[in-house]
Image: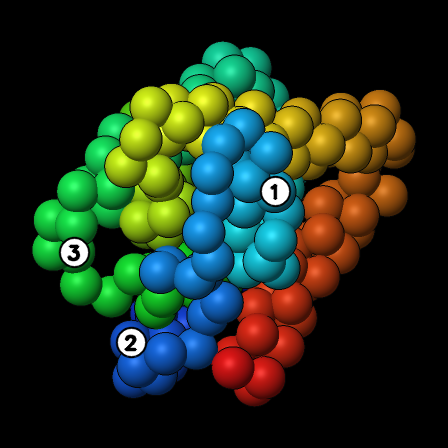
Amino acid sequence: MKKNQFWQYLVGAIAITLLIPSVASAHTGVGDPTGFLHGLEHPIGGLDHILAMVAVGLWAAQMGGKALWLVPGAFLLAMTGSSVLGHYGLPLPGIEQGILASDFILGLLLLFTTRLSLAASVGIVSILAIFHGYAHGAEMPETALGLTYGIGFIISTAGLHLAGIGMGLGIDRLQPIFRDRLFRSGGAAVVIGAVYILINH
């Protein structure tokens, strides 16, 4: 697949999500989290979060090398920082659209076996992580239990990254023809999941 085709699909996916005012189950302002377990459950409580975080791990494994730890590490760092914005209610538009866009973008990166520079890859996941972190932070309790809530969602996110990395490393041991097909299949699954969210919310 040509690179210009990838960017056309990518721009189209972003445009679609920006036109939908409230499509992803970002969970902002829902529930009453009070500590570690609530934080632990938050990233796995929505398909939108799961798809993106597993996809980050898969993409990192697909690229290999330093990307294996720098890409998910950048996501965790940016997510943690942006959770502060959500916690204190600082304005950030398009949270739900941004979360859904992250699913499409990461899925397409996998689907087209896109290999970017390490700096570009880190930059992309960092930007996408901002939306996820904001959604998590919006539910962080005002009390000291907010710290344990934050630790919970960081651990849960890291676990989803590791799941993606584990799958990716397993795929990477296969013959090239099977490896590429399975990585593409993973990307297709993420995109299909994003479409499902778009249709049902």
Q: Position of residue 171 (x, y in %)?
A: 81, 33
Which of the two discs, 2 and 1, labels the residue nearer the N terminus?
A: 2
Check disc 2: other Cα within 10 Å, few if <14, some if 14-19, many if 20+: some
Q: In what element is the residue under mark 3? A: loop
Asked whether disc 3 touches disc 1, contact meaning CB atoms under 8 Å apart, the reply is no
Percent of width and height locating residue 61: 64, 28
Q: Which label is found at residue 41? A: 1
At label 2, the amino acid type is Leu
Q: Disc 1 residue type?
A: Glu
Q: Please state which of residues 102 and 119 is positioned toward the viewer in this rendering.
A: 102
Tag 2–tag 1 contact (CB < 8 Å): no
116 lies above or below 101: above
Q: Tag 1, which secondary structure?
A: helix
Q: Earlier in the sequence, mark 3 or mark 2?
A: 2
- Viewer-nearest of discs 3 and 2: 3
Question: Badge 1: how crowded within 10 Å, few (<14), some, or many (20+)?
Answer: some
Question: Residue 152 location, x and y as percent?
Answer: 53, 28
Kindly identify which numbered label has been placed on residue 18.
Answer: 2
| Left or right: 81 in relation to 70 | left
